[in-house]
Amino acid sequence: METRYYQHVERLNSDEVEGILDGKVYLFTKLDGTNIGIHLEDGKVVVNSRKREISIESDNAGSCQYVLDTPKFKAYLDKHPNHYLYGEFLVKHTIRIYKETAWRRVYIFDVVDYSGEKPRYLTYDEYVPLLEEFGIKYIPCIVVLNNPIEQTVLNYVDKSNFLQANEADAGEGIVIKRYDFTNKYGRTSWAKVVRAEFSANKKSGVIKMTDIEASVVEQYVTVPFIEKEISKVLEAVGGEWDNKYIGRCLGIVWHEFVNENMWDIVKKYKNPTVHFNLLYTLVTDKTKVVMTEFFSERGIKLPF
């Protein structure tokens, strides 16, 4: 089986997931780690991160080493060779208050069967007993809801406390799945609500139609969002920082901000006139401020 990277999880209000709440919906805690995929290729375990194959020589935060040193993944795939395991390898990103025993382990959140003409996502009820047979950890479902309204779903954002050291603390957010859902583009797609963004939006109150660009940056380009994108770049380059990656960080923050949020912004602000040169400048300036603090905590001085 060839390497297949995990889908992009869309914001709840994106048109990519329009209608996802119209049925049986499963809510899960969104862990703040690094994405990992595990499958068999010619009888050998192959591991990938979000965007590349990894190896012990070119690892991603030690996730490949962990998988290859853990026989239960090979045992599972030997029995289910057409399955692809997707999960999160828990390393310190934005959320740093997980239980000490939770770090540097893989938690599966999806199993995909590639034996048919089209890939099929196994339901939670299907894959849990399969994983438990081999003692493989997974992210448990918070709740199952039937045809919920959006506010009902949002009420569970602060209950996403799986693996938190203090159960009163919430995690990064929630992921929303409906296993029989196909979006209007014919794709299986999941939704998410990220807690930091949710809190910022909840506190924002009435949106003023002046200074739209500044308001957008305040609401959507949050510190956790920027730090998460910086961490993705660090993972992609093997964890070794060089200032030549500054442009890459600035670029990925801008790209992910536009890709994830623009449709929501258009709806929220009712087709606003946006000065993109100004918006780009504001996003870049805020990213530089966050990057400076992020790397300063790690003893690295940036040339800003």
Image (cartoon, rainbow, N blue to C red):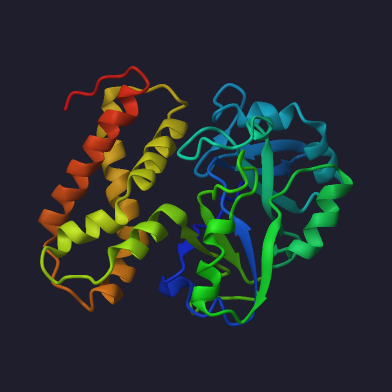
Count up the numbered dots: 0
* Residue in view at x 79 percent, y 43 percent: 136
Instruction: Look at the picture and state if 292 lies above or below 57.
Output: below
The residue positioned 23% from the left and 55% from the top of the image is 217
136 or 78: nearer the viewer:
136
Q: Is residue 256 left or right of residue 108?
A: left
Q: Is residue 70 above or below residue 265?
A: above
Residue that appears at 54% across and 50% down: 170
The residue located at (50%, 50%) in the rendering is: 172
Indicate the position of residue 294 as horizontal and vertical percent values: 33, 30
Quadrant in which the C terminus is drawn: top left
Q: Is residue 272 above or below residue 299?
A: below
Q: Position of residue 90 (x, y in %)?
A: 60, 37
| Residue 173: % across, % down | 51, 55
45 left or right of 222?
right
Residue at the extreme top:
299
Is 234 on the left-hand or right-hand side of 78? left
Can you tell which quarter of the image residue 288 is in?
top left
